[in-house]
Image (cartoon, helix red, strand yellow):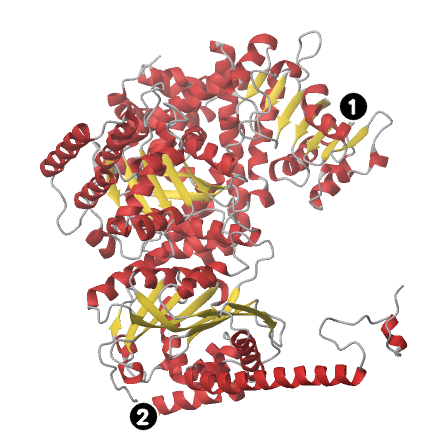
Amino acid sequence: LTVSSSDDPRALFHPAKAWQAEHNLDIQRVTQQAMIHELTKEQTRTIEHVVPWFLENMPRPYFRQVPEQMRLDHIKALAAVKEANMDLYLNLKSHAPDGRQMLTYIRPGTKPGVLLQMIKELPYNVSTSKDYLPLSRAQVFSAEDESMSLNVFVYGEEKTGPINIEKSGARILQYAERIQQNGHHDKVPGAKSLSSLQAPDDFSKNEPRPSHLFDRENLIEYMGKCSLSYIEKTDPRRFLRQRELFEVVSGTEGTAIVVEDSSTEDGADNYWINVAIANALPQMALENTSRLLFLHHFDVLGAHLDVISDGDNGTVTMLRMHVSPAAGSIDESTFKLLGRELKRCKWLDPETMDLVFDRYPWLGVRGGEIITAFCSLMHPVMAKQNPLIYSKANIFNTVTKERYVSHTSAIAGLFLDRFNPKQPLSDEAFESKCEQICATIDSDVEDATATELLLKMIEIVRYTLKTNIYMHDRYSLGLRLDPKVMVSDSEESKELPYGIIFAHGRRFNAYHVRFRDIARGGMRLVTPPSTEQYALESAHQYDECYGLAFAQQLKNKDIPEGGSKAVNLINTTDLSQSGKNFVMRKSVKAFTDTLLDLIVDTDETRENIVDLFGKKEILYLGPDEQVIPEDINWVIKRAEKRGYYKPAAFMSSKPKAGINHKEYGVTSEGVNVYLDVALRHLGKDPTKEPFAIKMTGGPDGDVAGNEIKILIREYGDNAKIVGVADHSGCAEDPNGLDHEELLRLVNESMCISNFDSSRLSSDGVLHNAATEDGVKARNTMHNRLEADAFVPCGGRPNTIDAHNYKHFLKADGTPSAPLIVEGANLFVTAEARQALFDDAGVVIVKDSSANKGGVITSSYEICAAMMLTEEEFFDNKETIVNEVLAKLRGLAKMEAELLFREFETYGGSLPHCSQVISNSINAATDALSTALDTLSDEDRESLLPLFRAHLPQTIADMSFDFVHERVPDPYIKNAIASCLASKMVYKEGTKFIEVQKPEKLAVIALKYIEKEKEVAALKEALHDTDMPEAEKQSILALLEAGGARTALGLF
């Protein structure tokens, strides 16, 4: 260790620095003080320069709205940067008194695009941030010398205690009182209202006119929805103006825009753009608005963003942007275009926005939407030819290449011309334009893939029958399609649906497929977890929707509505959980509103939609996967607002006014009827002898839980439930699982892993899926356990397929259960059903028969919504529900008995017989529906009692006298046809229908009804006849079995 020659022993521990004098402590102290003094002087000089500049150049709203401490922080940060001679790139982070995150971004200059770039750099993006926080306030300021942009972004919901509104909002209340008393309304020159939602005409004036909105009590109530900072910091005039805009969009999903010339404040070329957006992500709303302003060459001088609660409807984002045209004065058409695009961009897919705002602005928003929609629509069809060449990305990249985009644009133009409500193309002009575009493609496009895609786009235009492209406030782009457009040359011919509606919107594509004019089916939301899975789902989306709708058509044979399904594929792969939920709810709204665009008949739709289909359409929805009660309530309210006939009937399973399927066990009631009939067919009377059941689906599930309850209710100890498996594991006991314990799990909505193992017999076992062995046991339980019947009430689709069906068989080739009753959809594939029957004689009751109780209930719910008021339904709900349950049990029993009767008579597998019955009833319904149009009014009225008899008695007694007033005529016609068809098929069998000529079916049906009446009269007379009782009962049985058919002379 080398010691300094200094006498100061501290030198041992504090070695001399390069700037220190080594031999004199006084000199060191003087040096330090001199440096401090010099730095202080330099900092003082900087502050003395910065503060006056800051005070002179920051706009007045900055000093009113930004707290003093934050202003001091801004000055200190600016001084430090200026002193260091660095560029003005600063990101400052602080916290509001209530804990919210406050970010200040400072950048040099105020040129167009600075704000947009800042927004893109912000954290807490809904797409990427796991710790997402909502943007609750934004303040945008520009230095008046254009040297700097300073913007404050506040994240998180404002947390305040009870607000003394009369104190905090005193300025606003006093201003409103003056307005109400004096009625000042000086007009601002050049103001422009761009709201399509009928914003008040006088919004554009310096001071608002008196309004009930500004009455003291109403204003205080409104302030209760606002944050304290918004009330305290907002200029009273702006507060009342935004209150008016809030009223325009409250309770909707709409957007309202108003532009004011600010010449009285900042010069003739400056404007205030006021925007109110219902239920938008605030940061996304700010980004989209800033993006459009940048693209239209506006410089943002200042801005304010606030978020106001709209109760159950969500929130309203308020934006006020102070802008200046970068290229000088602009005309009114620019503002009108800006207004349209501001309203549309909330609903535009990001891919569309990139296409029309960044790559090819000349395409226009409508043109871009058409192109991206057509690309999504083509994918499921073209992918069948070659999934690699025609991937979703390749399709889009090909048709939007610079080399081909002019042709793509021409096709989009053809679509717009074809459906322009002011002057639609005639068929002749349309064909001429098609030929011209095709000829240009043929001569100019050398790439075969591009040619194929462009020609397919023309085909889409040709097969579009209606579109909402010209609806002013649409939520997405909708196309009512001729189903031929979805047929691929590479696939086998199959039954064409009646109609297809396709919707393309922000992050979603959706199909609604239906097989009859009046149809009902569920809407499901599909949210793949990865980009790769999303691409796969996109390729199969239409086929999935088609298959589900076709299965629904088979299942809906007993009701007036045909089968339909809606599948909404939503791209949430890059979103946080909160972002995913937000986009899902928006997708439901956009899709259903688009359906309403294309089916409601209002002044608005007649004015803006060219209808090449030319026929009124009626459809009904139901909830399916990932649809929540909030969605159902919104859909019904929206249907009412849009003028849908009987909006309460538009979607079933309403949380309050519907029939809850799980609560009343409607699906399981039907499943159990088929199980009962099937067991008796196999020689077991379940009421008299024990039988063993194994099932998938947990006690907390709808179908499984209710089936457990029904088995115990109907058969008591005879029902031995030997195994139950669900996601959590499985419980097995060859002696039968304890009934009390199973009911405990059902009533407490608990999964099977919660089964009390002490209630098992010595042979029983409980497997938990938390272990590897437990997973294996759960996944194989339905194969391993021996039982009289297997009832899948839950589980993955296609669990038993053509490759693994032999696992269901024992070593000797006999089945582990001779009977399967499919309570769950698609648990067994069609190929596996046939193989199990061929190899082991397994009797399988197909899902389209076994679990039809749910669709029957939903149909009755639609009838109740049309025929009764909500109050009438509430007052009689329990009686109506009991009658519905009796009806569905009766329909299930009639089909089950016919199913086994024809199975025994004609042979073949039971699933085949099930499909034959469905096809026979549906074919008869179609023929009758067509033939009913040819009957006289008197003949049609004579069949009306069939519809009355179909209804639950309470609904019929209360409202059938008004049936023509309350129920659409097409629905009544379908109801008569389906009731008569199912009546004849269930009574006389499928062969009776098959041998009749369709054109004669209606006449035969009328005669059949008359003969039934004659038979009923004979039976009544026979009751009073004096003869031995045994003979009398034999004759009555013969009359019941074939009297009407015999009387017709048809055998």
Q: Nearer the viewer, residue 977 or 312?
A: 312
Q: Nearer the viewer, residue 1043 or 171?
A: 171
Residue 449's x, y, as percent? Answer: 30, 27
Task: Label 1, secondary structure: give it.
Answer: loop
Provide the residue designation for mark 1. Answer: 734
Q: As displayed, is residue 1051 above or below residue 689?
A: above
Residue 105's x, y, as percent? Answer: 50, 69
Residue type for callout 2: Asn
Provide the residue designation for mark 2. Answer: 182
* In this rendering, position of residue 158 left or right of residue 813: left
Crowding near the residue tagged with mark 1, few <14, some 14–19, many ≥20 C-alpha atoms within 10 Å: many
Residue 542's x, y, as percent? Answer: 40, 32
* In this rendering, position of residue 134 left or right of residue 685: left
Residue type for callout 1: Pro
Residue positioned 87% across, 74% down in the render: 5
Q: As displayed, is residue 461 above or below residue 158?
A: above
Residue 719's x, y, as percent? Answer: 72, 28
